Image: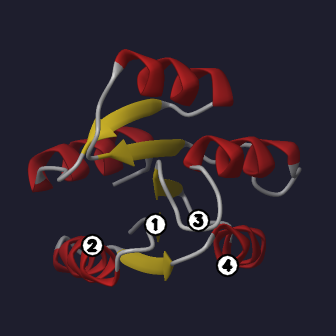
Amino acid sequence: MANILFVDDDPYTLLTLTKAVKVLGHQAMAASTGQEALALAAEQVPDLIFTDMRLSNIEGTTLVHQLKEQEATAHIPVFILSASPSEDVVARAEAAGAVAYLDKPIRLQTLLDIIEEYTSG
């Protein structure tokens, strides 16, 4: 069972993603701000993190940089989600240290495939 942190300032998106992961048999945490995400990640050390590119208080790439700078969270695979895909967004996500950029809304099968690939199941 994987423990996954979702970061998004849209409550509906957070609810949908956390419920989907729980249905798949995993644990889910939710954060609506970058600061909340950093605190949760350091305290709970999730197996994976999915963050929106555009949060109300911070950009997703900045959050990835901050996670990668902390020893406790540097090893965690981070995926950036965005509803506004562009080559620039993809390049910035990769440069920040994200594993990948994913289009929103993310398909349930894609989420399941990522969880299986990056965790023990």
Q: Whole-Å distance between the Cαs marked 3 and 1?
A: 5 Å
Q: Please name which of the two marks, 3 or 2, marks the residue nearer to the observer.
A: 2
Crowding around mark 4 (Cα neighbors within 10 Å: few <14, some 14 to 19, many 20+) is: few
Secondary structure under the numbered disc 4 in the rendered image? helix
N-terminal of the two: label 4 or label 2?
A: 2
Q: Which mark is residue 4?
A: 1
**C-alpha separation, residue under disc 3 versus residue under disc 2:** 19 Å
Quadrant for residue 2, please give it: bottom left
Label 3: which residue?
Answer: 46
Q: CA distance from mark 3 to mark 4?
A: 13 Å
Mark 4 in CB contact with mark 2 (< 8 angstroms)? no
Give the mark nearer the N terminus: 3 vs 1: 1
Q: Is residue 94 left or right of residue 40?
A: left
Q: Residues within 10 Å of mark 3 (few under 14, many from 20)?
A: many
The label on residue 36 is 4
In this rendering, position of residue 18 left or right of residue 6: left
How far apart are labels 4 and 2 at the CA level? Answer: 16 Å
> Quick one: 64 or 24, which is closer to the camera?
64
